[in-house]
Image (cartoon, rainbow, N blue to C red):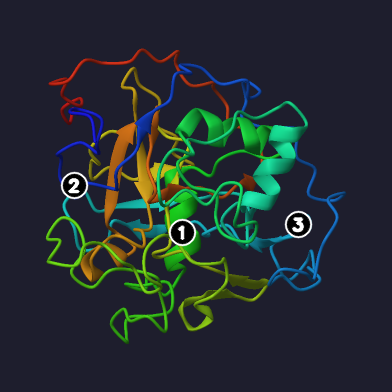
Amino acid sequence: MSEGLGPVDAPHVLADAGHGQVSPSASSDADADGGTSFDASTVEASSEAGARDTDAESDGGVACPQGSIAIPATGPEGFRMMKGREGEHVVVLSEPFCLDVDEVTVRAYRACVEAGRCEEPWTKDPFSMYPSFPDHPVNLVSWDKARAYCAYVGKRLPTEAEWEWAATGPEQYKYPWGNTPEPSCDTVDFTKYGAPKTRAGGDVGCHGGGPSKVGTHLPGDRVWPSGHLHDMAGNVWEWVEDSYAPFTKDKRTDPLVRNETPMHPLRGGAWNRSFGGMAITFRAAAQFTYQVPGVGFRCAQGRPHPTPPPKHEIRVPGWKPPKKT
């Protein structure tokens, strides 16, 4: 991995998400607001890919498109984001939203490439899933490419707060499936002694190396009344929309971090991470051009992001993330 391209060293920011290549693209063709307008009363519901027919009233007044489920608003009490860690703070999400059941697959991403709306992911890596594994998560995809895909399907990347709320829920679980059991290959695709403390034998995951087919580890699902979310821990890290910044302890409503950093958070851990990286509150961050075998994404749908991200510049090795203000 090239120096200076990995996740940054900051509180609760993990070390290496894998080996990969820097994307030559420094901008995204995604819509400025990260997606299309959202009308909860007219979006088609689905019972496929882990989602059941969505009841708009019982699921917070939102119906979701095929392959996604409704995630309710938090209520005025909010939830404790980064529970038990430095920067723990209360976050209120005032509106429900939809989140993809699965990480975006090679099959889905390839359709965007063939339509001329997405760039191919980096493929010159032995753990590249593209194009040979259609039902596995597309990996080696940079933040800007992930954002472009979500815009293509009329969606957007989730905010970091949306992602964590969807993973932990009102129970504030440690893992998507609960506080116990500890991660195993029944619940998650990970490497028990993986990065940053890789032992002899390398980062092999639960299936010999590389991510697994989406929805393989069903006992590790995050279960909501509207359906199940697969692989919210392990398999591949997932990009979120926010710019990276250390958390403060201030209460926030519908937060979306925008700053001039080229770094964006990664959530959920990956097949080449140790069991410690499977906890919901662990976070990483990487430059927007980062493309590695342990990184993918999923899309959300809700009200458009209120502001576009700043125009990124590639920073030289040695650049440091912003300090907490």
Q: Residues within 10 Å of mark 3 (few under 14, many from 20)?
A: many
| Sequence-first tag of 1 and 3 | 3
Q: Does residue 94 lie above or below 242 as drawn?
A: below
Residue 58 visible in this rendered orientation of the protein: yes
Say which residue label 1 marks. Answer: 165
Residue at image coords 21%, 15%: 316
Asked whether 105 or 29 is in front, the reply is 105
Q: Which mark is residue 15?
A: 2
* Image location (x, y in percent) of residue 184: 33, 81
In the shown orientation, is residue 234 left or right of residue 42? left
Could you tell me which residue is drawn at 74 percent across and 41 percent down? 111
Residues 271 and 169: in front is 271
Residue neighbourhood size for the residue with mark 1, other residues' Cα within 10 Å, grouped as few (<14), some (14–19), many (≥20): many
Dot 2 amino acid type: Ala
Q: Which mark is residue 64?
A: 3
Query: Circle 2 — which element?
Result: loop
* Residue 7 location (% of width, % of height): 25, 39
